[in-house]
């Protein structure tokens, strides 16, 4: 990557962190929570300035791997009436979830702009097969045909070409059932075998057909933006599940270094690719932060929801120890992934 692409990637990654932490900050200010510090980056301070009016320190730190909003009473009891812990639980839920939700909303907005400005839209109707004389991929009497509108792949519904390609990649690594609409009727093609490809030991299905372009109407733009955004969110959860069940290895996981490299590579391939990856990472950042794991926003949300049901909080020391353990594991994972990403830059 050239210096320009690296700087552009770091700038975008930093902007996504600012958007995330800005969500927490804005709602904390709205609910009059005492804020000690708003920081972009982690580790040693590069620069910090404290507001004389609000007493909030605004800091830029050395490690560009995240940021935080430090609030009074966030991890301990406080006598400050405006401390986080002394606010109603519904306000704390909004503050805690706002960073991730704003990341998701920002990604959806960028996705909509990108689709509206892109050249063409494609649906799920088959225009033609790539091979005019395909082998008998299916155990059914006939396989896919030109004019078929694909409705689902391996049980997963598809609405746009983007959905379709992703589901074939994920589920088409082995024979799966395909439901199509053919001549006005639904037809199930049993155990259809797509061509496959492999990368780093992972096997992916590959489409063996071309799809038709659809008119670029306002309705279709909204439909494609909505489904592509939903597909991005679903993709993150499914890939996390696939990682846990061993389909993907740790080699498939990227940290800040890997994300920055991917953004830099995307910038080389043009504005559309760069914006799409930016939107995807923004949604990814939001969704992953909502995972119910200690130290993540989702883990804190889980404790708040338990408090809302029990009508009393779990002892803060207990919660603090759990988040501390989760943070330690998260930092270990980050070090491992970052070392892997750095090694990948030089191989």
Image (cartoon, rainbow, N blue to C red):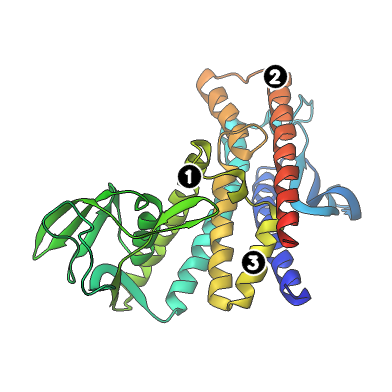
Give the mark nearest the N terminus, 3 or 2.
Answer: 3
Question: Closer to us: mark 3 or mark 2?
Answer: 3
Badge 1 or badge 3: first in the primary sequence: 1
Q: Residues within 10 Å of mark 2 (few under 14, many from 20)?
A: few
Depth-wise, is mark 2 or mark 1 nearer the camera? 1
Residue 150 place in picture, x, y as percent: 23, 61
Q: CA distance from mark 2 to mark 1?
A: 28 Å
- Residue under label 1, please give it: 237
* 243 lies left or right of 36: left
Mark 1 is surrounded, within 10 Å at the Cα level, by few (under 14), some (14 to 19) or many (20 or more) other residues, namely: some
Q: Quadrant of residue 1?
A: bottom right
Residue identified by numbered label 3:
263
Left or right? Give the position of 152 relative to 29.
left
Residue 29 versus residue 224 in the image, above or below: above
- Label annotation for residue 318: 2
In the displayed structure, 137 sits above or below 322; it is below
* Residue 119, label in figure: none
């Amino acid at each position: 990557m050239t210096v320009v692409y690296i700087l552009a990637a770091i700038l975008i990654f930093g902007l996504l962190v600012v958007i995330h932490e800005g969500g927490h900050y804005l709602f904390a200010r709205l609910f009059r929570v005492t804020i000690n510090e708003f920081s972009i980056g982690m580790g040693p301070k590069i620069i910090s300035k404290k507001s004389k009016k609000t007493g909030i320190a605004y800091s830029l730190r050395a490690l560009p791997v995240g940021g935080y909003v430090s609030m009074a009473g966030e991890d301990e009891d406080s006598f400050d009436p405006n401390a986080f812990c002394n606010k109603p639980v519904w306000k704390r839920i909004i503050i805690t979830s706002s960073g991730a939700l704003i990341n998701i909303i920002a990604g959806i907005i960028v996705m909509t702009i990108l689709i509206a400005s892109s050249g063409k839209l494609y649906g799920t109707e088959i225009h033609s097969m790539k091979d005019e004389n395909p082998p008998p991929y299916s155990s059914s009497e006939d396989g896919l045909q030109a004019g078929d509108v694909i409705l689902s792949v391996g049980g997963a519904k598809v609405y746009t070409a983007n959905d379709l390609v992703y589901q074939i990649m994920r589920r088409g690594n082995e024979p799966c059932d395909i439901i199509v609409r053919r001549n006005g009727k639904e037809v199930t093609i049993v155990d259809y075998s797509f061509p496959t490809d492999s990368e780093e030991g992972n096997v992916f299905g590959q489409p063996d057909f071309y799809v038709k372009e659809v008119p670029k109407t306002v309705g279709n733009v909204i439909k494609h933006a909505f489904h592509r955004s939903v597909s991005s969110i679903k993709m993150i959860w499914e890939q996390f599940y696939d990682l846990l069940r061993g389909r993907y290895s740790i080699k498939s996981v990227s940290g800040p270094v890997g994300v920055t490299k991917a953004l830099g590579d995307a910038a080389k391939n043009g504005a559309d690719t760069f914006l799409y990856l930016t939107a995807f990472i923004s949604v990814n950042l939001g969704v992953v932060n909502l995972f119910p794991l200690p130290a993540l926003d989702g883990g804190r949300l889980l404790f708040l929801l338990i408090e809302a049901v029990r009508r009393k909080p779990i002892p803060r020391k207990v919660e603090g120890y759990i988040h501390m353990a989760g943070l330690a594991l998260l930092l270990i994972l980050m070090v491992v992934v970052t070392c892997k990403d750095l090694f990948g830059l030089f191989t």
